[in-house]
Amino acid sequence: MRGSTRVGTALMVALLLTCASPAFGYYYESTTTVITDCTVCHGIASPTTATPTGPHGGYTATTDKCASCHQVHAGPSGGVMLLPAATVKGTCQTCHDGTGGHGVYGVLAARSVVVTASHSIETTAMVPGGDATTGGSKLGVFSGEGNTLTCSDCHSPHASNVVEPFTGDRARGSTSVTIQTNRLLKRLPTTATTPTAVYGSDWCGGCHEGRLSGSGPLANHPVDSTLSTTTPFFYEKIAKVTGTLTSVTTTGTLGRNNFGYVMPDPRTTDQSGHYPICQQCHEDARNVGDVSPQQVAPSEVFSITATDGVSASDNPRFQTFPHESQNPYFLAETYDDLCLNCHMPD
Ligand code: HEC
Ligand code: HEC
Ligand code: HEC
Ligand code: HEC
Ligand code: HEC
Ligand code: HEC
Ligand code: HEC
């Protein structure tokens, strides 16, 4: 019964927070009011930025994390797996409700920004570019109601069989620092047939098979993946420029800097034999390569000064990829602005 009491408390507090301060929704990260028992959501008593997995992992005989999601008795009717809500999305949203503008869904709407691209949840099973042979759409069988795509198709709620840690862009809280975590990303997202140990093109290609170059009879823009090379780049290891207004490159993470979104032309030794990964074109919208072609100007460096898009001049303003974006198709930049980051036709 303890589980249901806790989730009940979480919901109640969330409602109180919503009433007192709509901007905060269910989000709770300080000791200011109402809940002092952080265990309700984090599964541990004293969470810090150094324990970013919350209730999703680190299970031991003395932790009490299962109960933050599973009620052993008296779950909601229509519910599954003894979870607090009737759907997976509903369960995730008991804690990760972004409608107040925090999190990964609902953040754009909360800042009156139109959502132009999204991995929409529990609405579709159709994967654009999912068919390796035709490059067309393919109907998938996902874990949401009616086989639709839901959170647990990409994320493992228990952090089991997840990819290696990587540096994400997102500033998770006011005191957030650079964190390397696995983001609970499954090595085998639903419909993928080959597990991927690292987050990169092959991970996306597990669902979007028809967008990997060399996957079938079709021509796609070349993409670095296991289909194109035996040692493909991935999110934590790409070639990037070493600083502002330079064409010198090094290898490192794509995360928390903007230096991997341009590719100097002519290509450098680090880039030789490699193509861009999906995330060098598909990521949170940002400005790069506009001032000086294939370079990053001082005005274009990675800069996040506030959480969750509060500061309109942050670059990138939002860190919600691959959940929702203001740019079509989750493009980092649009039209020729994107192509010119890496190409300068004669
Ligand atoms: C963050 C919420 C969350 C926490 C914490 C959590 N679970 Fe789950 N659990 C889920 C969800 C969501 C599902 C259904 C989706 C799925 O299977 O991936 C699930 C499914 C299950 C299943 C069904 C089969 C399976 O393995 O997928 C079992 C058994 C289970 N959980 C046990 C546990 C135990 C034991 C703990 C604590 C050590 C725990 N869970 C902690 C959310 C959670
Ligand atoms: C009981 C509350 C609760 C529920 C329910 C819950 N989460 Fe979480 N989740 C948390 C907390 C707390 C954190 C840690 C945040 C931090 O410390 O930065 C977290 C972290 C995460 C992270 C980041 C992990 C990392 O390694 O960086 C992901 C991804 C995530 N949750 C997804 C989900 C999904 C998907 C579901 C539904 C299956 C879900 N959560 C359900 C509370 C919850
Ligand atoms: C578990 C399967 C799955 C994975 C993994 C996945 N996608 Fe998708 N993707 C989908 C589905 C399903 C849709 C359709 C969503 C919709 O219509 O809202 C989609 C839509 C898209 C779209 C079109 C969005 C729009 O609104 O136009 C792009 C672009 C995209 N995905 C890129 C990616 C990239 C890049 C990755 C890797 C970071 C990725 N996807 C990982 C299943 C997946
Ligand atoms: C198509 C796959 C996909 C789906 C569906 C998806 N996510 Fe994610 N999610 C990701 C990826 C990839 C990342 C890591 C992005 C990064 O750090 O660059 C991520 C990151 C996160 C994070 C961590 C953000 C941070 O602060 O670092 C949370 C929390 C999260 N997702 C929650 C959810 C919830 C809740 C749902 C469902 C409502 C969901 N996700 C659906 C792919 C997905
Ligand atoms: C109602 C559920 C809930 C409660 C209660 C809660 N948290 Fe959180 N907390 C979350 C969620 C969800 C996140 C992740 C938010 C996100 O990524 O958008 C989070 C994130 C955090 C973070 C990471 C953000 C950052 O600044 O880096 C810290 C630290 C944290 N919480 C500390 C605490 C402490 C300490 C308490 C108890 C005083 C507490 N939380 C109570 C749900 C909760
Ligand atoms: C060189 C940049 C670039 C790379 C690399 C790239 N894309 Fe795209 N992608 C685009 C552009 C531009 C569009 C916009 C629509 C179009 O031109 O087809 C797009 C559209 C899409 C779409 C949605 C529309 C459609 O055509 O079905 C999906 C899904 C997608 N890409 C997935 C991926 C995946 C998965 C990868 C990695 C395997 C990838 N892309 C690599 C630039 C890129
Ligand atoms: C992140 C860097 C990057 C971006 C952005 C990018 N490309 Fe490329 N593109 C490359 C690389 C690397 C190659 C491999 C050949 C080379 O080094 O020029 C390539 C190859 C090509 C080719 C030759 C394809 C072949 O099969 O030989 C074309 C055409 C092309 N890109 C067009 C585009 C267009 C159009 C856009 C904008 C929608 C674009 N590229 C965006 C990096 C990029």
Image (cartoon, rainbow, N blue to C red):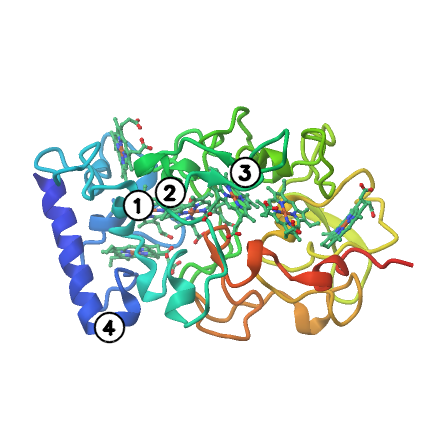
Q: How far is disc 4 from disc 3 in space, using C-alphas?
A: 42 Å
Label 1, ligand 4: CB separation under 8 Å: yes
Q: CA distance from mark 4 to mark 1?
A: 23 Å
- Kindly state the secondary structure of the residue where label 1 is placed: helix
What residue is disc 1 on?
89
Tell which circle, 2 or 1, labels the residue nearer the N-terminal end: 1
Label 3 sits on what residue type? Ser
Which of the two marks, 1 or 3, is nearer to us in this view? 3
Residue 260 relative to residue 311: left or right: right
N-term mark: 4 or 1: 4
| Circle 2 or circle 4, nearest the eye | 2
User: Does dot 4 land on a helix, a strand or a loop?
Assistant: loop
Q: At 52% from the left edge and 67% from the top edge, which residue is drawn?
A: 317
Q: Amino acid at mark 2?
A: Cys
Circles 2, 1 touching at the beta carbon (< 8 Å): yes
- In which quadrant of this rendering is ligand 5 seen? bottom left
- Answer few, some or many: residues within 10 Å of disc 3's Cα (few below 14, many 20 plus, some between 14 and 19): some
Residue 256 percent location from the top left of the image: 58, 57
Q: Position of residue 34 (x, y in %)?
A: 16, 64
Q: Residue 21's mark?
A: 4
| 18 lies above or below 160 | below
Q: Residue at x 68, y 39 (%)?
A: 233
Residue 320, image x and y in percent?
47, 57
Which residue is label 2 attached to? 151
**Marks 4 and 1: which is nearer the front?**
1
Reading the image, the residue beneath label 3 is 137
Number of marks in the image? 4
Q: Amino acid at mark 1?
A: Lys
Classify mark 2: helix, strand or loop.
helix
Residue 90 seen in render: yes
